Image: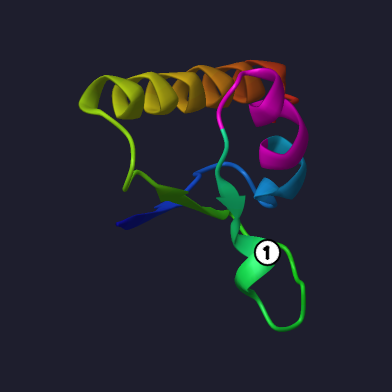
Amino acid sequence: MFFWLQLLGIADSSELIREKAVEKKFLMVPGQSFLPDNGSSSHVRASFSMATDAEMDAALERLASLLREEQAAAPKA
């Protein structure tokens, strides 16, 4: 029912999910929501219990697209 995903290259998933994912029309829960100290987390929780296969594919493609955008915008070392 729930999938936990670690977003590589993302130190804190909160802003990414609460703001940018909403703009891309998909929702997940930032891992921070499940930490007792409200610390940062690179994880997100997805729930696909009511989604069709096509809806799951679309949500994961939107997440992948968002992660590619974040990587492209990140300062180069």
Q: At x 66% / y 51%, what residue is drawn? A: 11
Amino acid type, residue under disc 1 in the picture: Gln
Above-or-below relation of 70 to 32: above
Q: Is residue 72 magenta?
A: no
Q: At x 61% / y 72%, what residue is drawn? A: 34
- Residue range highlighted in magenta: 17-26
Residue under circle 1? 32
Query: Is 69 or 27 nearer to us in this picture?
Result: 27
Above-or-below relation of 22 to 54: below
Residue 21 spot, x, y in % from top left: 64, 29
Query: Is 75 or 38 nearer to us in this picture?
Result: 38
- Predominant SS along the magenta part: helix
Decide if residue 29 is on the left or right side of residue 33: left
> Callout 1: helix, strand or loop?
helix
Image quarter hosting the C terminus: top right
Q: At x 66% / y 47%, what residue is drawn? A: 13
Q: At x 49% / y 27%, what residue is drawn? A: 63
